[in-house]
């Protein structure tokens, strides 16, 4: 596997548009803190990890909170099944991500940036370190960046060790501090009390990668792409039953069927949007759009054709959650196990519809009672797949379902 | 463990601590370095790290037990992690898994008798468009088929 940083020609309106290393930082110094925040606010950029919190608001809250030090954390713990856009960004467009971090550091007065790289991506550690070393040589990192007094910022890369839940920002901070990656109660939010108790911005790789483009071309330009409520574009990681899987940059507001044509998906039965914690959309709803106001997503798209067994898919997801639940809160720890048990019962045909409904009720309880995003979203595939594919799962003439007491 | 082995390990841990610091935040990088070299973090190593970081050994153990890439029990010299997530599953993970199991004569979660290889499943490794994928130690192999996977296994020492 080639791990050297290489350039592949990719096309896209925002992230994959023209950019050269360091120009964003230069522009940031020219603009000054207030104008950077203003451009960001104008752009309407929202968090690209999936939750969609407005980035400008996050930065302003951090700028406003008082602390001796501030930290910029880049969340590269890309663990959602079916997501690989951050891998592409880090390997092929590191200049965007790191320039974004330096700009954040400049804007918020932070001296230190940390990239939390997932353990699975350890193979890119060396090349990223080398890249940072190159930036230090060119005075884009380190002391008095670009000759500006008191503009000091440096980036370190820290590795995770194979825990999905560490993609949750407070769990990520716990992990950085050397603890078990168990999410914290919020509030306080990391913008006030983050890494080591200092104000901390935690941004997704893709969010940071958009920042230099916004500075260079302006918030208004960014806003021209996408829809009113979802500005700019999104990277989609497409895998599964299609001819051209890969990373695609498309403006928000693209419909599912448009994407299916682009990636060459035929005989499609359903798409799982947002990975294991996302929702499963059947063919009948393919005119829906990717947007924060319709289907918000971190960009994981898994395509299933007519031959796929949706119960098998669902079981794979639930096994994932049972394994990856940190075990801290009861709804998530026990709830996911119970949902998986339910799927096994359905497989054996040993269920009643009363039981299934109780499980769905349990899922909805988990959505409100779990401590962090993992348990709040893990019932999503259970509910959406059983809802959208009940014909297939419960009423087929195969072995399954015929033993059902209902 | 022999006395000179213990001394050597202690020295190594001291070096790691002087490199990463004695802060609690240094714990993960220290443990990851030990894991990378020895493939597991022994009770003795855990106690040494705890002593130098001035924390209770159980704190160290609690961190190790949380992360799936950190082990407290001896593993094989090489750790193979096959991605079990749905995208890899749909393009032939099961065939690759069967071939590996047959070739090594062990199940997932086990280590070969000669301690050459530990076989594990892992969740999504971010190679979904090039599946099936597996990680051998730190290296990633993609677009596997049974033949290719077995060939990679045979090259591991």
Image (cartoon, helix red, strand yellow):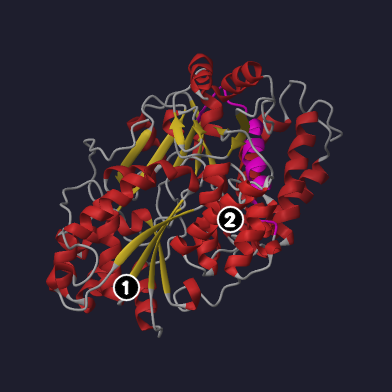
Kindly report which numbered mark, 1 or 2, lies closer to the viewer in this rendering: 2
Residue closest to the eye, B103 or A26: B103
Name the secondary structure under disc 2. helix
- As drawn, A80 above or below A230: above
- Disc ID at residue B10: 2
> Furthest residue to the top?
B147
> Furthest residue to the front?
B4
Is residue A135 magenta-colored? no
Report x, y in % for residue A288.
43, 45
- As drawn, A10 above or below A112: above
Real-space CA distance between mark 1 and mark 2, rounded to the nearest whole angstrom: 34 Å
Return the residue at label 1.
A111
* Residue at 30% from the left image edge and 63% from the top image edge: A101
Chain of residue at mark 2: B
Name the secondary structure under disc 1. loop
Quarter of the image that includes the C terminus of chain A: top right
Report x, y in % for residue A19.
17, 51
Q: What stretch is highlighted in magenta?
A: A304-327
């Amino acid at each position: 596997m080639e791990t050297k940083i290489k350039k592949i020609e990719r096309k896209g309106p925002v992230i994959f548009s023209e950019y050269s290393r360091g120009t964003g930082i230069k522009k940031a110094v020219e603009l000054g803190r207030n104008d950077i925040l203003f451009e960001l606010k104008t752009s309407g950029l929202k968090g690209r990890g999936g939750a969609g919190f407005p980035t400008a608001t996050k930065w302003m809250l951090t700028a406003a909170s008082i602390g001796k030090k501030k930290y910029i954390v880049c969340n590269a713990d890309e663990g959602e099944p079916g997501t690989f856009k951050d891998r592409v960004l880090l390997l092929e467009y590191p200049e965007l991500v790191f320039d974004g971090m330096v700009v954040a550091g400049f804007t918020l007065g932070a001296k230190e940036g940390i990239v939390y790289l997932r353990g699975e991506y350890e193979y890119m550690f060396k090349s990223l370190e080398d890249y940072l070393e190159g930036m230090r040589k060119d005075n884009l990192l380190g002391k008095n960046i670009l000759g500006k007094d008191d503009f000091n910022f440096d980036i370190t890369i820290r590795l995770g060790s194979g825990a999905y839940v560490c993609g949750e920002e407070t769990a990520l901070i716990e992990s950085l501090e050397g603890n078990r990656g168990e999410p914290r109660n919020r509030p306080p939010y990391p913008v006030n009390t983050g890494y080591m108790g200092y104000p901390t911005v935690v941004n997704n790789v893709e969010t940071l990668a958009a920042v230099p483009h916004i500075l260079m071309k302006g918030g208004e330009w960014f806003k021209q792409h996408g829809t009113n409520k979802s500005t700019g574009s999104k990277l989609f990681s497409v895998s599964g039953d299609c001819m051209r899987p890969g990373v695609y940059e498309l403006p928000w507001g693209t419909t599912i069927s448009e994407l299916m044509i682009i990636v060459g998906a035929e005989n499609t039965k359903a798409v799982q949007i947002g990975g294991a914690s996302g929702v499963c959309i059947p063919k009948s709803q393919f005119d829906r759009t990717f947007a924060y106001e319709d289907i918000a997503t971190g960009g994981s798209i898994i395509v299933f054709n007519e031959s796929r067994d949706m119960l098998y898919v669902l079981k794979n997801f639930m096994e994932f959650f049972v394994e990856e639940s940190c075990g801290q809160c009861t709804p998530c720890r026990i709830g996911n196990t119970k949902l998986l048990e339910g799927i096994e019962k359905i497989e054996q045909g040993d269920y009643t519809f009363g039981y299934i409904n109780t499980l769905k009720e349990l899922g909805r309880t988990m959505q409100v009672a779990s401590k962090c995003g993992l348990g709040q979203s893990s019932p999503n595939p259970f509910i959406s797949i059983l809802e959208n594919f009940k014909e297939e799962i419960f009423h087929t003439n195969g072995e399954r379902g015929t033993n059902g007491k209902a | 463990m022999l006395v000179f082995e213990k001394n050597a390990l202690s020295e190594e841990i001291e070096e790691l601590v002087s490199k990463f610091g004695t802060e609690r935040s240094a714990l993960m990088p220290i443990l990851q370095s030990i894991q990378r070299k020895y493939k597991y973090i022994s009770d003795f190593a855990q106690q040494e790290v705890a002593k130098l970081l001035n924390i209770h050994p159980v704190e160290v153990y609690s961190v190790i037990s949380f992360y799936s890439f950190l082990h407290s029990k001896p593993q094989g010299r090489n750790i193979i992690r096959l991605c079990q997530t749905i995208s890899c599953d749909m393009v032939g993970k099961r065939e690759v898994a069967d071939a590996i199991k047959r070739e090594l004569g062990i199940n997932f979660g086990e280590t070969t008798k000669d301690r050459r290889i530990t076989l594990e499943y892992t969740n999504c490794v971010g190679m979904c468009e090039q599946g099936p994928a597996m990680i051998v130690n730190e290296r990633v192999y993609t677009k596997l088929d049974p033949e290719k996977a077995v060939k990679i296994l045979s090259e591991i020492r």
